[in-house]
Amino acid sequence: MLDLSRLRALHAVSVHGTIGAAAAALGYTPSAVSQQIAKLERETRTTLLERQGRGVRLTDEARQLAAAGQELLALVERAETDLEERRGLPSGRLTIAAFASAARGLMPAVLADLARRHPALDTRLSEVDPHLSVDLVAKAAVDMAVAHDWDIAPLPAPPGVEHALIGEDICDLLVPAARPLAAREAVRREDLRHERWVCQPPGRVCHDWLMRTMREVGCEPDIAHQAEENPTLTALVAAGLGIAVIPRLGRGPLPDGVAEVRLEPLPVRRLYALWRTGAARRPAVVEMVRTLREFWPEVERRA
């Protein structure tokens, strides 16, 4: 009989692409994941992973087995949901993927509150880009995700994934304090045609938003510097190297040399909690959504 934990390890590698990433998602060491898959290979008398450069790739047999493993894991999830629902209390392990500023500005308080009120609930947080986390929920790689969207890129809704709005995160224009723009209470996008920008790399929602909205006013934005994290972008603004649109969530106090200016129309991104339909009745999922919504007004006020 196939061992479910070994199938879980193989499924994680198929979703995350590498043994290291699968290990991080499962809370194991890479060697432990490798051992699980090696045992599964012996158990099935089948080669499941092949070396490819510095990484590995799944064989055709492994992809078929991983798909079967996903179906079995869905059955187990439904059974665990039924048991937890009968007990009526959040319990067991709940894995959550959240984008960086939510992991920094929202999740610590939420997870601490849940740990205090529900000691039988074992929450596990991973910081994951929002464009990846929705797919991880759909593929059962994590139980829940906290993701966001902007008006130009509505949140994708794969079949079998449900979502609930947590709140709206206002975004501000940050400019070097020595620039004339810093003295203005508000600016419109048309006023920024000749500015240099700092922004996240292409493929990120923030980058796509900037390109599209500036093109709508007849301008190709001059992106001088690119960085992944908002604190880095803010530091570049503080150094006088450009302007940036930065959400308030998880931003923290602005450093010296940075001024906040209202951009009109006001950019807003929406935060969502996502989970699989099969886990919708699970008390842990219900309580996580409720707590996220309960804490959001206070997080928004502080921001």
Image (spheres, helix red, strand yellow):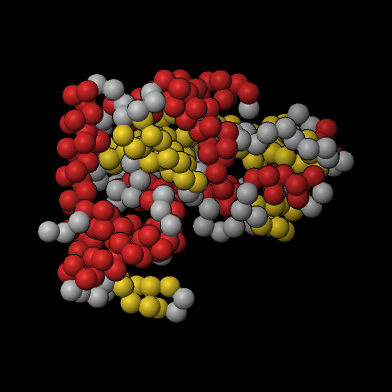
Q: Residue furthest right?
A: 178
- Camera-side residue: 102 or 269? 102
Q: Position of residue 195 (x, y in %)?
A: 75, 50
Residue plotted at (29% across, 51% down): 139
Considering only vertical position in the picture, is 190 above or below 226? above
Q: Is residue 229 left or right of residue 283?
A: right
The quarter of the picture where the C terminus appears is: top right
Residue 281 visible in rendering: no
- Quarter of the image where the N terminus is located: bottom left
Nearest the camera: 95 or 257? 95
At x 65%, y 36%, the residue is 251
The residue lying toward the viewer, choosing from 164 and 195, is 164
Question: Measured along the vertical axis of the image, is residue 71 above or below residue 271?
Answer: below
**132 left or right of 93?**
right
The part of the image, by quadrant, that contains residue 30 is: bottom left
Q: Residue at x 20, y 64 (%)?
A: 65
Where residue 124 sits: x, y (%)? 42, 40
Instruction: Name the residue at 17% across, 51% down.
Output: 72
Q: Nearer the viewer, residue 212 or 283?
A: 283
